Image (cartoon, grey):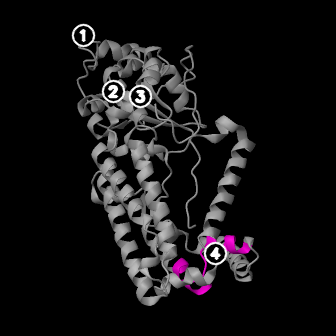
């Protein structure tokens, strides 16, 4: 069972979590001040190649966080699926980066460092913060005029491993080596353009670089956990839910869920395409089990009132897909009890059963001898819940998503 990320409010309560957040914010500001990021001249020197403190501090923070995150996921301490990654809007991101970069050069601060300067009563920092607030106000009042562009080129949660189609360990090692190369270039630039001498730099930085490389190599060797690994970590807890039939919902509960306007019900039919075409519940989407991983990222982006119901002819195939979704951190996932066969046994009318008599079948095979493909055209595909009054044990319990944490510049 993974231990992280932690939901602090569950352990410390609402205000206790806020105290921790306040402490982290203050500590971050102290680190930036110690690094000299409260001085606009020190920050602006980066753009003149005279002092590379900005790149060294921020890139070091990024690289250290990266290797620790992926090392933690490799050994099962952290569920990377629950780590918020800012969605990528490519063109707006490029334009926004250019605007922020120009503002950084002209003003000498980024938003985070301007707050550090303002906190120490530096007039240029205060002026920058006031300007930032005015910019936020101006953006809010004008975004309606370029909203289409603002949300264009949406690539979702898009990372380097997604871009290159390689294991995260390769990306981690490559980024670490690139960072060290950038630091080496920066030291030479500081010596050439600035007043620094490489001999004055601390020698322990070589040991730190060696540790980073070793940890990156460990991430590469250990690799990221497979879906089966993730299931093995949670099998004791989730397997008990399966055994106790806590996740198998009665067809009547599914029908009520489908008609509940407060719930976004997504029905996932994982049967063979021929069975799906023969008959399926209205609004059920067909996804082959081998393709389910292609949809997981999209499923995790659904709103917190979403309930996923997986169905097969009975329960065998649906259970395997349920395990995959749960292992990959998709929440509010349930299995249709008895599958489509059970659904038809309850909601199909007598003439249907007379015309398409149930047939003997092997486990998880379709149990009706249909002579044509009905799809979702038959009334049993979406029965009227007011007609069928069936008592059942409610099992659907919405689990809230963890709130997305913000991203941005230090």
Residue at 54%, 29% in the rendered image: 257
Instruction: Of the two numbered discs 4 and 2 on the same chain, state the one appearing first in sequence.
Output: 4
Q: Secondary structure at mark 1?
A: loop
Image height of 207 relative to 230, above or below = below
Disc number for residue 142? 4
| Left or right side of 208 for 373 | left
Which stretch appears magenta? 99-118
Q: Secondary structure at mark 4?
A: helix
Tell me the distance, in whole angstroms, between the alpha carbons under discs 2 and 1. 23 Å
Question: Quick one: quadrant of the C terminus?
Answer: bottom right
**Residue that carries the numbered disc 1 in the rendered image:** 360
Disc number for residue 320? 2
Can residue 376 be seen in this snapshot? no
Residue 340 picture location, percent across and down: 37, 22
Instruction: Of the two numbered discs 2 and 3 on the same chain, state the one appearing first in sequence.
Output: 2
| Left or right side of 141 for 227 | left
Residue at 44%, 45% in the rendered image: 80
Tell me the distance, in whole angstroms, between the alpha carbons under discs 1 and 3. 22 Å
Within-10-Å neighbours for mark 1: few <14, some 14–19, many 20+: few
Tell me the distance, in whole angstroms, between the alpha carbons under discs 4 and 2. 49 Å
Residue 34 picture location, percent across and down: 62, 68
Instruction: Of the two numbered discs 1 and 3 on the same chain, state the one appearing first in sequence.
Output: 1
Whether residue 101 is in magenta: the answer is yes
Q: Secondary structure at mark 3?
A: helix
Residue 135 picture location, percent across and down: 66, 76
Residue 38 picture location, percent across and down: 65, 75
Pointer 4 with pointer 2, Cβ within 8 A: no
**Residue that carries the numbered disc 3 in the rendered image:** 381
């Amino acid at each position: 069972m993974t231990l992280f990320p932690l939901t602090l409010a569950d352990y410390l309560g609402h205000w206790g979590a806020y105290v921790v957040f306040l402490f982290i914010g203050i500590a971050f500001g102290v680190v930036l001040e110690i690094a000299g990021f409260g001085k606009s001249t020190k920050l602006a020197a980066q753009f003149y190649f005279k002092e590379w403190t900005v790149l060294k501090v921020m890139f070091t923070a990024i690289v250290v966080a990266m290797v620790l995150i992926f090392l933690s996921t490799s050994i099962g301490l952290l569920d990377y699926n629950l780590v918020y990654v800012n969605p990528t809007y490519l063109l707006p991101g490029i334009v926004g980066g250019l605007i922020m970069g120009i503002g950084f050069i002209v003003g000498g601060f980024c938003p985070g460092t301007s707050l550090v300067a303002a906190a120490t009563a530096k007039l240029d920092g205060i002026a920058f913060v006031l300007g930032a607030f005015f910019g936020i106000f101006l953006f809010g009042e004008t975004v309606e005029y370029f909203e289409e562009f603002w949300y264009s080129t949406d690539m979702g949660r898009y990372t380097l491993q997604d871009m290159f189609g390689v294991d995260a360990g390769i990306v981690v090692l490559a980024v670490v080596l690139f960072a060290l190369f950038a630091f080496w270039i920066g030291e030479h630039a500081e010596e050439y353009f600035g007043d620094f001498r490489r001999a004055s730099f601390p020698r322990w930085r070589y040991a730190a670089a060696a540790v980073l490389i070793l940890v990156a190599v460990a991430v590469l060797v250990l690799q990221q956990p497979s879906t089966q690994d993730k299931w093995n970590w949670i099998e004791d807890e989730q397997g008990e839910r399966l055994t106790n039939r806590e996740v198998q919902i009665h067809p009547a509960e599914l029908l009520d869920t489908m008609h509940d306007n407060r719930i976004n019900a997504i029905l996932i039919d994982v049967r063979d395409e021929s069975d799906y075409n023969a008959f399926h519940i209205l609004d059920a989407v067909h996804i082959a089990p081998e393709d389910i991983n292609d949809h997981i990222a999209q499923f995790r982006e659904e709103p917190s009132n979403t309930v996923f119901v997986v169905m097969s002819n009975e329960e065998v195939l649906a259970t395997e897909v349920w395990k995959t979704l749960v292992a990959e951190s998709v929440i509010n996932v349930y299995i249709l009890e008895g599958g489509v066969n059970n659904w038809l046994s309850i909601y199909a009318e007598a003439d249907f059963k007379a015309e398409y008599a149930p047939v003997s079948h092997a486990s998880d095979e379709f149990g009706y001898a249909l002579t044509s493909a009905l799809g979702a055209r038959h009334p049993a595909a979406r029965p009227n819940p007011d007609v069928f009054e069936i008592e059942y044990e409610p099992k659907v319990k919405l689990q809230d998503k963890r709130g997305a944490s913000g991203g941005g510049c230090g």
